[in-house]
Amino acid sequence: MLPRVAGGLVDSADMAEVRQLQSLENSARWAQAIQDNSFDVYKIYGPIIGDGFTAANRPEILALMAYAGRRLSMASSESKRQFARPRPFIAATDLRICLATPPSEFSFPSGHSGWGWLSAQILARVEPAHASAILARGRDYGYSRVVCAVHYQSDLEAGRYLADAVLAQLDNDPEYQRLLAAAKGVNPR
């Protein structure tokens, strides 16, 4: 997936959506978007999975997510450099962002959206009883980046596509499979 052409119809629709979401400033959704700047899966998914979903109780999740996250980060950073799409608040300096420190990398694809989707897909495998809610939360986590005016909707889509590609690679990675089995509480043979 390529970034949208500057000034094209999709690019204009992307910016219109970001502008519309500026009305959420000081709302509960804006506050959620601020919290969603964190990559902490225990904070993101804990309310769904339950009080016992903590780093102290489930350290194997941290190892699994760190391994997967490194793969996604490498792919996302390279794509950002290649496509060099300016973020919404750079393209339109009147936009307000909900972050104290503006992101410095380019916009396309969204690393946060990729992380939300990758982490949700992995956790849905670990916690299948909560899969639907986890997947919905992973998508909403990514959408917070549009609420914050630091990404466009098409950046989120690209981040999810990238997460899908990374997960396909991880599915064939023996170390990832070992970490996934440990997170599920399964002893691999």
Image (tube, rainbow, N blue to C red):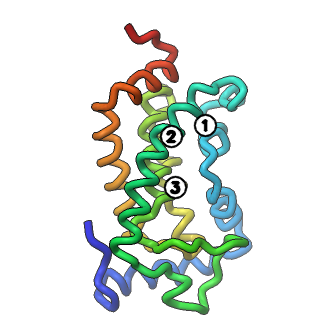
The disc labelled 2 sits on which kind of residue?
Ile
Q: Badge 1 local density, few (<14 within 10 Å), some, or many (20+)?
A: some
Quick one: 110 or 176, which is closer to the camera? 176
- 2 and 3 marks in contact (CB < 8 Å): no
In this picture, is 71 found above or below 182?
Answer: below
Mark 3 residue element: helix
Which quarter shows the C terminus?
top left
Mark 1 residue element: helix
Answer whether residue 165 is visible to the viewer in this image. Answer: yes
Residue drawn where x is 55% and y is 31% of the image? 63
Measured in 3D between alpha carbons, the distance from the residue under mark 2 to the one under mark 3, in whole angstroms, is 10 Å
**Label 3 sits on residue:** 140
First reached walking from the N terminus: tag 2 or tag 1 = 1
**Label 2 sits on residue:** 134
> Which circle marks residue 48 in the picture?
1
Position in image of residue 185 (x %, y %): 51, 15
In this picture, is 2 found above or below 76?
Answer: below
First reached walking from the N terminus: tag 2 or tag 3 = 2
In this picture, is 127 found above or below 185?
Answer: below
Residue drawn where x is 66% and y is 67% of the image? 30
The disc labelled 1 sits on which kind of residue?
Ile
- 2 and 1 marks in contact (CB < 8 Å): yes
The disc labelled 3 sits on which kind of residue?
Asp
